[in-house]
Image: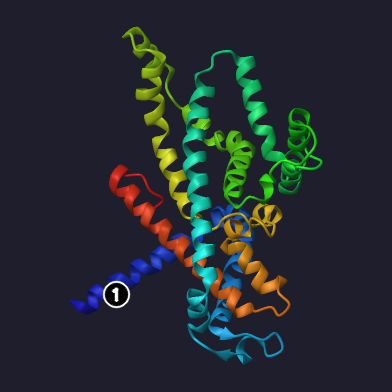
Amino acid sequence: MNNKAISNASASVAVHKISSWKRVRRCWQLYLLLFLPVVYLLIFKYYPMFGVQIAFRDFSPTRGIWGSEWVGFENFIKFFKSYMFERTVVNTIRISLYGLAANFPLAILLALFINSVRNLAFKKAVQLITYIPHFISTVVLVGMIFQILSPVTGMYGSIYRMFFGEGLPTDILGKPGAFIHLYVWSGIWQGLGWSTIIYIAALSSVDPELHEAAEIDGASRFKRILHIDLPTILPTASIMLILNAGSIMSVGFEKIYLMQNNLNLRTSEVISTYVYKVGLAAGKSDYSYASAIGLFNSVINCGLLVLVNSVTKRLGETSLW
């Protein structure tokens, strides 16, 4: 009996292999298109993971990865005991949560507003005005911030002297407490319109008959938004929240680094900028220490992604997996 079951199982496996090859031969064009993305992922995403072990070694470029001494968790312990651990982690989380709490609901509200507009010309004008800042490069955006808020040559300084005469106003760019607000709200101005695209796309799937039926029943525009439009985009909003939660510890490097100065460094130093300074910009680059910090950051992001995905799935039955 057992031999018969084994032979049947082997036969089914062989039939499955034959059918798989037939499917590959029949759709070879699709598999050919899939080949290049798979190779790209293997070379640029998975192969570099080989270098993660640098975080557990006293890496030296002259000795190479295998020739460098294995030190275990020594680099991680060094970071956890450093005074920069609390500063960088707190700054990173605070900036990320502030940006998420401000941008996430505003993007949904703007999408609902744009979708409710019936004047097509006004609707397109609002979309164009809110989308354009997304295409401004980070360097240009930071240059605009400096030009506007400079106490000497900027618009801020000129307006101050216009009303108060000679002298210089407070340097907002050098105030540690003002950095987080400048960073988050300039980012909202730049990316809010672009963030609404996916929600507007989800709202386009709403059946117009639902609005017509609700309007006949006497529902106001606000109630139709509340009971028809908002539930439609909730699954999309849940997925976007999960994706954003998975990058809470990954605050953008370029903009923060460009906005940093010696006066606001206490509140602007985040993990990404610290990794760059330790690993590349320092006089004696510590590759192992920088790799350990980056690996710690990635592990926390992965944990947050899994946690938020589980909570969202339990509460709303919407998740990535």
- Name the colour scheme: rainbow
Q: Secondary structure at mark 1?
A: helix
Q: Nearer the viewer, residue 263 or 170?
A: 170
**As drawn, is 65 to the left or to the right of 319?**
right
Q: Position of residue 316 (x, y in %)?
A: 31, 42
**Type of amino acid under label 1:** Ser
Q: Position of residue 246 (x, y in %)?
A: 47, 55
User: Which residue appears at 56% of the width and 85% of the height?
Assistant: 57
User: Which residue appears at 69% of the width and 57% of the height?
Assistant: 261
Quarter holding residue 39: bottom right
Q: Residues within 10 Å of mark 1 (few under 14, many from 20)?
A: few
**As drawn, is 64 to the left or to the right of 271?**
right
Check the image and report above or below for 175 versus 281.
above
Q: Position of residue 222 (x, y in %)?
A: 40, 18
Residue 24 can be seen in this image: yes
**As drawn, is 234 to the left or to the right of 22?**
left
Quarter holding residue 63: bottom right
Q: Position of residue 147 (x, y in %)?
A: 77, 41
Quarter placement of the N terminus? bottom left
Residue 249 can be seen in this image: no
User: Which residue appears at 69% of the width and 43% of the height?
Assistant: 170
**As drawn, is 28 to the left or to the right of 239?**
right
Q: Nearer the viewer, residue 273 or 306?
A: 273
Q: Which residue is mark 1?
A: 7
Check the image and report above or below for 181 versus 113.
below
